[in-house]
Amino acid sequence: MEKKILGIFICTLLIATAIPALGTEINTSNCTMQQVLLTGVEWSLTYDRGEFDECRYIIQTMPDKGYLTCGVTEESDNYYVWLLKLDSDGNEEWLVVNYDLNGSYIDAYNMDVFSFHIIQTTDEGFLITGASMVSDEVQGELVWATAGYLWKIDASGSTEWVQHYYSVDELRLDFTYATIEIQDGYVSTGFSIYYNITGYVIDIDGFLMHTDFNGNLIWIQFYEATGEDFLTSLCKTSDGGYLCTGWIDSTEVADGALWMLKTDDTGEKQWEHIFDGPGFEYTYGKGCFETSDGGYIMAGNTGSYGAGAVDSWVIKTDGSGNEVWNQTFGFKYQDYTWCMDKTTDGTYAIVITKNIYSVGGTRDDIFVVEFNETGETEWSYLNEEAGIQRVTGIYHTDDHGFIVSGRTYEYGVSASDGIIYKIGAFPHLDIAISGGIGVKATITNNGFGDAIDVPYEIIITGGLLGMINKTISDTVDISSKATETTKSRLLFGFGPIQVTATVGPKMATDNLFQFLIITI
């Protein structure tokens, strides 16, 4: 179990502390923005401050309907947490670099400074979670390490307070990953790293903590599943408790496994479930919710199931955490998600980084999938372009579309630009098959986006002695909230038939009776 904290975080000297923030500078040197208009995207912009820039997570702000993204920016080989406030068209309104939330950098997956999550608070300010370098005196020596933080700002980006979370006495670092606001403060989840004085990890446990509105700790609960246990996502449940999800890594699972944990309102564990396969399962992402039937849903990644080496993995459970269904989304190689969001339409959306090479490569694409509570895909959008796009945030916007955040760069180049995509609303198709004088497939678009040039296929089989075997294919345009019916054709045959209609990602099947000659 003992090992240095390498890979997920780089901590050369492992000790936690709280250092008072010296102030947040509102940087007047704006980003260079580049318009990147792509088919299927309403708008796309890159944000470049000259070195390494990443937009890790993004939310829509209210009431102005703009956006706020958090991430990491590089200045002269040093790395800092930054915020970028955008208007509804993606134009910069203000930029904040917090020079007190800083760290070193090794590569895209190993650094000592992060921002993971943002929420807009009821006072119209914002709360950001993450991890950064801190220092303190331990056994007479000044040491540096990475510790989690909560950073509260007002609506203009000015710092109200910063709190780091740690225990010097217990030799513990608390990495805050996701947060929500409740009636008397904030509840945050993450994981605690326990180490010895020589800087080796001896255990990792998930935690849930409750703070007041100034970030002062009220209570903290720790959870251990089997070994190294990470919690990265959080939601409040209808019974007043909390659902936390993450992943575990130990000798008791194949490689890694997804982890779902339910608590009461004080953080006392009520139950937990582990979802595992023969390969490696993990998640560093945000995305767990209570479903309309009182169950729960979470997103992660699997090396055990799906179409490729790694696929996005969504698991739906009942109210006790027992699996109801699971679904994978992906292609041939490594396709993984860091974020899932719940829409106001009762569906869910994940954003996937689609890798088009078996190892490495010069291009990664963006794949957005919207699906319902049964795991059925409502619609999907694949954005293919040159360069590597690593997307880590998705948020459902008030126009029923999506805002997606990440970074873009060229293979072999250390610098990257933050990137934001605004994606329009998706269509939601329903198919009804009917008989009578002919066979019809009636397609209704119940979504807020238009379905343009959508391919459909109707397969009719059966009849006396199985003599009917007909396939009809074409394309159809269906505006939002509109209905279209497939074209009529002549069909010869007699007896019971099966009709299967596939329109875009949707499929419907029905059993009918065919007379000798009718039109369909």
Image (tube, rainbow, N blue to C red):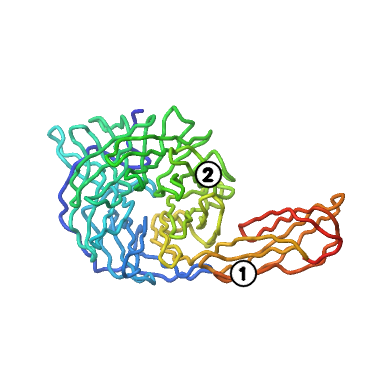
| Residue nearest the observer in this picture, 166 or 502 | 502
Above-or-below relation of 396 to 359: below
Q: Residue at x 29, y 31 (%)?
A: 200
**Residue 512: x %, y % from top left:** 75, 55
Relative horizontal placement of residue 184, taking residue 302 as reference (left or right): left
Q: Quadrant of the C terminus?
A: bottom right
- According to the picture, the residue beneath numbered tag 1 turns out to be 483
Real-space Cα separation, disc 2 to disc 1, in angstroms:
38 Å
The amino acid at mark 2 is: Val
Give 402 or 6, whichever is nearer the viewer.
Answer: 402
**Residue 298 visible in this rendered orientation of the protein:** no
Q: Position of residue 305 (x, y in %)?
A: 56, 41
Image quadrant occupied by the N terminus: top left
Closer to the camera, 512 or 110? 512
Q: Amino acid at mark 1?
A: Thr
Question: Which of the labelled discs sits on residue 310, or is there none?
Answer: 2
Most distant residue in the front direction: 436
Label 1 crowd bin: few (<14), some (14–19), many (20+), radius 10 Å: some
Residue 389, percent from left and from top:
46, 57
Residue beneath the point at 12% across and 34% down: 140
How busy is the neighbourhood of tag 2: few (under 14 within 10 Å), some, or many (20 plus)? many
Residue 427 visible here: yes
218 relative to 105 in the view: left or right: left
Q: Is residue 288 above or below residue 92?
A: above
Q: Are marks 2 and 1 in contact (CB under 8 Å)?
A: no
Please state the horizontal and vertical placement of residue 31, each as a whole percent of the image: 32, 67
Q: Secondary structure at mark 2?
A: loop
